[in-house]
Image: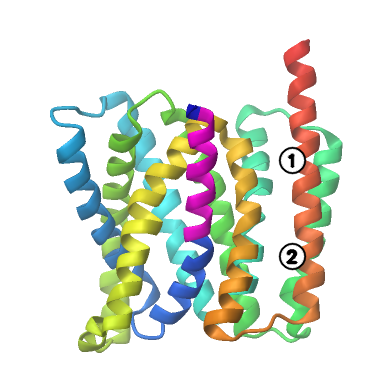
Amino acid sequence: MKTNLGFLFAIVTVSFWGISFIAIKIVVEVIPPITLATIRFAISLLALLIFTSLTSKGKKLPKSAKKYSILAGFWGITMYFIFENIGVRFTTPSQASLLISTVPIFTIAIADLYRRKMSNLKLYIMSFLSLAGVAVIILSNGLKFNSSILGDLLVLLAAFSWGMYTLYVDKLENYDNLLATLEMTKWGLIFLIPFSAVEIFIESPKVVNFFRPEILLWLLFLGILCSGFGYVMWNYAIKRLGSRTSSNFIYLIPLVSIIADSLILKHVPSMGVYVGGALVMTGVILGERFSRTEEKFKARD
């Protein structure tokens, strides 16, 4: 039952995250990207505080878990959303979501470096196939370096940041999921604030536009569903399914994003994006299968 709930939470969460690329693209036209992340996680933290006060009265996260929560918050919230929000400002939601689907590659590579042991060679061959797809996506608008390529590269840095986040959130699997999510959200927000202050000083946005009804609705969607409860559900999925299995659900994000991008923003991806996306998804999916096969053989031994 708990495994089934893990699958359900993973599917719901990646559906929210797929649509989030469209929400970010819309909102960053009005709110600067780092400030958007700060507002988003302030909303998320408030929602989590209310929910925690109702369901986890008197409970506290042990000190042994706090350092991992701080590191998870830094990588999975601060760095991830700085890179992603700025990246989506310059590229399309469809391309961004396809590039984010490389997260499993970074997750495996970072884990291998951490444990100082290389995974199956076939896994790395598939990773290179995915990276070839990334190159096709980035170059789909031509060889000239432009803002779109800059956006794509920033989104790849976001994918790397999420791989780092997964490394640390794995270490929190034996602790209360809600309290750990609350702690990492708090620290992620704390680290975001100085970046946001500098950004507001430089860009001087019109704050009155932040309160437009459609902007407020997208902010609530991002803060409550994608960040607050999204992180709770995702961390629960990681705990029940494992980091590698749960990472597989990230494959669904591009599908959701491309459909939503076409319906809401009327963006039609170029043929290069489709070809590159196919290479990325083929490499990552086959690589994950090789990885699981390798783990099964090790378990038998």
Q: Quadrant of residue 32?
A: bottom left
Q: Nearer the viewer, residue 182 or 251?
A: 251
Q: Which residue, as the protein is rendered here, is positioned at the far front?
A: 1
Q: Which residue is mark 2?
A: 134
Q: Which residue is mark 1?
A: 288
x, y percentage for residue 83?
A: 49, 65
What is the magenta range?
Answer: 3-16
Question: With respect to residue 100, does 148 lie above or below?
Answer: below
x, y percentage for residue 248?
A: 65, 45
Name the residue: 82% across, 70% down.
Answer: 275
133 left or right of 177 in image: right
Q: Nearer the viewer, mark 2 or mark 1?
A: 1
Q: Amino acid at mark 2?
A: Val
Q: Label 1: few (<14), some or many (≥20) within 10 Å?
A: many
Q: Amino acid at mark 1?
A: Glu
Question: With respect to residue 279, does 56 lie above or below?
Answer: above
Q: Main secondary structure of the magenta part?
A: helix
